[in-house]
Amino acid sequence: MILLTGVTGKTGGAAASELIKKGVSLRALVRDADKASALKEAGVELVVGDAAERDVVARALDGVEKALLILPNSQEQQDMEMQFVDLAAEAGVRHFVKLSSLEALPEATSPIPSMHYAVEQHICTTDMDWTMIKPNFFMQNLLPSGFVIKAEGKFYLPMGDGVTVMMDCRDIGAVIAEVLVGTDHEGQSYKISGPELITFHDVADQFSEVLGKKVEYVNQDPAAYRERVAPFLSSEWHLDAVMHLFSEVVDGVVMPTVTDTFEQLVGREPIPFRRFVQDHIGVYQ
Ligand SMILES: NC(=O)c1ccc[n+]([C@@H]2O[C@H](COP(=O)([O-])OP(=O)(O)OC[C@H]3O[C@@H](n4cnc5c(N)ncnc54)[C@H](OP(=O)(O)O)[C@@H]3O)[C@@H](O)[C@H]2O)c1
């Protein structure tokens, strides 16, 4: 039995779809059973509850051989993840897979990458086998810009000339599925990337090409961007953490590199940004 978390979200949902195709026994910890009804219909066993609650997590982990940990960024994420790791080790989970990030390095000072690094380190102190999945900026982060691209032909980010190796969450899901059902992934920290180094100027060019109209990248002043996104983020902590991470992209604190890890694991090329836009054309046009 494999326990999944985050299945009503972007990467966990993609991982669940891939794993269902592989026909393995799956259980998912979800907060809202209605949101996961399609997964239930596809044969996924649901445990309903919050990852903050020990008894819920312990119940979800009962009899589980492998577990996937994905939680969204919040001030509580580290504590929830640490508790989840401890409970998984107690439950006798053999292989633990964590969605982390490319920037989660020993020298990380930004709140989100340092949180991921601390949890990675904690996992390594347990007896469980582990695999860390370490992507960079998700292409799906640009879905909320669909509205403003439609309305103004512009998108706003405070990224300067910063470079990323953007990755489609569907590809991250494919990696997770391979790690959970394939062999020899234990003890691996997989730095996975999309097919190209890409700036947000390149992103604007690719939007323009695919949409057949000029799309402009507005390199927004951080204070103005902060105000723009504040209503959509869960707390002041989250807002500070995102702004800090974005400032590191601008400053090139972690210089991303294109890796062939995705192709080696999944056996095809990763989805390029152009294809992501084509696949979500209704969001942008
Ligand atoms: N965005 C990026 O560019 C990027 C890059 C690298 C790494 N990451 C990492 O990716 C992770 C987020 O992944 P994602 O974007 O796929 O997530 P997401 O789309 O935001 O979805 C979050 C999932 O977690 C569930 N969840 C939230 N709080 C929960 C709780 N207390 N108990 C149980 N389940 C809970 C949500 O369920 P509900 O449907 O009930 O809300 C949802 O299924 C973060 O740790 C982030 O640091 C992100």
Image: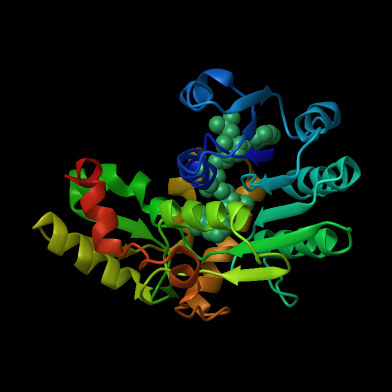
Residue 262 x, y percent position in the rendering:
47, 68
Q: Is residue 96 above or below residue 7?
A: below
Camera-side residue of 221 and 247: 247
Residue 33 x, y percent position in the rendering:
58, 20
| Direction left: furthest residue | 212
Residue at x 25% of width, y 58% of height: 275
Q: Is residue 14 above or below residue 156?
A: above
Q: Is residue 46 above or below residue 272?
A: above
Q: In the figure, is residue 37 to the left or right of 99?
A: left
Residue at x 60% of width, y 52% of height: 181
Camera-side residue of 230 and 126: 126
Quadrant position of the C terminus in the picture: top left
Q: Quadrant of ligand 1?
A: top right
Residue at x 59% of width, y 39% of height: 6
Camera-side residue of 108 and 264: 264
Q: Is residue 118 above or below residue 81?
A: below
Camera-side residue of 184 and 115: 184
* Image quarter of residue 111: bottom right
Quadrant position of the N terminus in the picture: top right
